[in-house]
Image (cartoon, grey):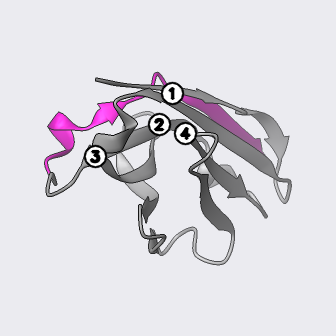
Amino acid sequence: QVQLVESGGGLVQAGGSLRLSCAASGSIGSIDRMGWYRQAPGKERELVAAISRAGSTVYADSVKGRFTISGDNIKNMLYLHLNNLKPEDTAMYYCAAAKSGDYNEDSYYWGQGTQVTVSS
């Protein structure tokens, strides 16, 4: 089992910045990829950014150039730096972790989420 705990969300004005953190514990050795997802009210959950154990990253087109995902393997931490925030970035942000070869989101490990609200 893997436990994920997010922190760092909050209320920020458009154009502002936040840093989200995700603390991972448990069977970390089984994890191959970690990422950040978000879900806004009335919308489907979407992948924001992901990073593999090898360090390769992917981003949603809507956040490219504004958000940066990074990890600290020593501290078992995952981060998401959110810059130039827009009101449409308002959502609950979730940290997720996946085992090698597992691409079924239903079987990912999930955190409880941290709310990001961007005012215009």
Q: Is residue 55 left or right of residue 32?
A: right
Left or right? Give the position of 114 relative to 60. Answer: right
CB under 8 Å between discs 1 and 4: no
Q: CA distance from mark 1 to mark 4?
A: 10 Å
Residue 43 shown in magenta = no
| Closer to viewer: mark 2 or mark 3 | 3
* Residue type marked 4: Ala
Amino acid type, mark 1: Gly
Q: Nearer the viewer, mark 4 or mark 3?
A: 3
At 78% across and 47% down in the image, what residue appears?
18
Which amino acid type is marked by label 3?
Answer: Ala
The residue where tag 3 is placed is 98
Magenta region: which residues? Answer: 104-120
Element carrying mark 1:
loop
**Lower sequence index among marks 1 and 4:** 4
Tell me which residue sits at (20%, 54%) in the image: 100
Q: Quadrant of residue 119?
A: top right
Disc 2 to disc 1: CB gap under 8 Å: yes
Question: Which comes before the other along the chain, label 4 or label 3?
Answer: 4
Which disc, if any, is residue 113? 1
In front of the other: 76 or 37: 76
Task: Give the number of marks.
Answer: 4
Nearer to us: label 4 or label 2:
2
Disc assigned to residue 94: 2
Label 3: which secondary element = strand
Q: Viewer-nearest of labels 1 and 4?
A: 1
Q: CA distance from mark 2 to mark 3?
A: 13 Å
CB within 8 Å, label 3 to label 1: no
Position of 49 with respect to 77 (left or right) is left
Query: SS for tag 4?
Result: strand
